[in-house]
Image: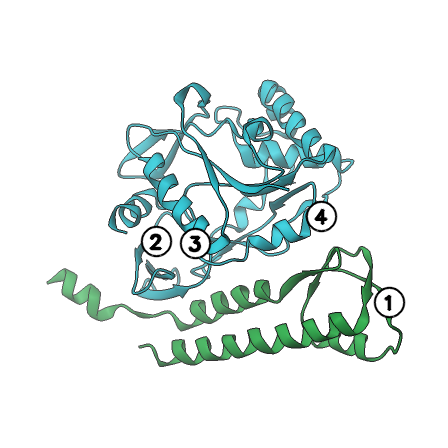
Chain colours: A cyan, B green
Amino acid sequence: MSKGVLLYAFNNDTTDYVSMAHWSAKRIEKYLGLPTTIISDMDEAEYGGVRVFNATKGGEKWYNASRNRAWEHSPYDQTLVLDVDYIVNSDLLGLLFDIDKPFMIHRYALDVTNRAHFVALDNFGEHQFPSTWATVMYFNRNNEGKYIFELVDMIKKNWKHYSDLYKFSSRTFRNDWAFSIAMGIIGGHKEPQYYHIPWPLPTVGTDVEIEQGEGDDMFTLKYITHLQQKAVVQNIRGLDMHVMNKEAMEAICAGS
Amino acid sequence: MDDIVKKIRACFDHEAAKQTLREKYEAKLLFAHQGGMFRAGPELIVLLTSYDTGEMVIPDEFGNPTKVTRLALLDEVKHRWQEQLNAWLVELDEISRQR
């Protein structure tokens, strides 16, 4: 059984996602011992809308809408799909290959700064439907996984219809929500815990400065606490992280 | 000058660091065994110790009944639990010294 990681990286006017992907591939090899396939050909890129990651830089065009094709893009029997702004910093994700379920995805994000930043993103739409995080996804070649990707494809083609049904804005295509709806359908419109990765997705918000510290697995976070408005520092070692501050992520990739 | 003031005022966020460490090691206590996924900890150790059969069926982390070889799983749970708790203690000690 072949195992590997699939990364999608499409550059836009502001962010060099391809360099991030190459940087990530080295870490994936180091910490997980797995090969990586990078999809960066703009012919495969699908526009997902404009998203703002840094208020001072304004919105950026977001080519993130190809993920429903991961089933066909992956050359592996067991595939891990990662965002390129996810820092692999431990061997933890290797466990997903051992569990080997047809499909797995994160249900909750963990705010590494402990400021409870992401609680509002646990659900989406006016009906507060449970949301998942497509930052990390695992699938094998079981038909059940295939059905999920086919459902996401169908949901994407009928995005306006689903936005009316679940009552959210259809302006931006969101992988997180498309996969959430697909799993809801597969699970008989109940929350299918069977597909959830059994630990939260460690996430660093857009307002957090992050730098690589001493040693390959050490990162230093700088941020302002909410209650006391105090500047604080936290050192993180050996913990994978989803970094939402793309500028800081680019600087880390360029510097190491 | 503003920059210097900011640097002087920045101190370690011990509470967040402790919480992050807890989450990190909670995840590291998970492991796959005989087709199921288990979390190393005292509950599982007590459960496995309280039986004397060679094989037994227990629910894994997803609630799926899983047939396991009792002593092999017990060995792995004990080893992983202590290994990860030791590593946790060492890191906790390190962060408590940061100012």
According to the image, label 3 marks what residue? A30
- CA distance for labels 3 and 4: 31 Å
First reached walking from the N terminus: tag 4 or tag 2: 4
| Badge 2: residue crowd in 10 Å (few <14, some 14–19, many ≥20) | some
According to the image, label 2 marks what residue? A208
| Residue at the image position 32 percent from the left and 65 percent from the top | A232
Nearer mark to the viewer, of 2 and 1: 1
Nearer mark to the viewer, of 3 and 4: 3
Amino acid at pointer 2: Val
In the rendered structure, the residue with mark 1 lies on which chain?
Answer: B
Amino acid at pointer 3: Lys
- CA distance for labels 4 and 1: 25 Å
Nearer mark to the viewer, of 2 and 3: 3
Residues at marks 4 and 2 on the same chain: yes
According to the image, label 1 marks what residue? B56
Q: Can you say whether B9 is above or below A153 in the image?
A: below
Task: Tell me the element at label 1.
Answer: strand
Tell me whether circle 1 and circle 3 mark residues in contact (CB < 8 Å). no
According to the image, label 4 marks what residue? A193
Task: Tell me the element at label 4.
Answer: helix
Would residue A134 be visible to someone looking at this image? no
In the rendered structure, the residue with mark 4 lies on which chain?
Answer: A
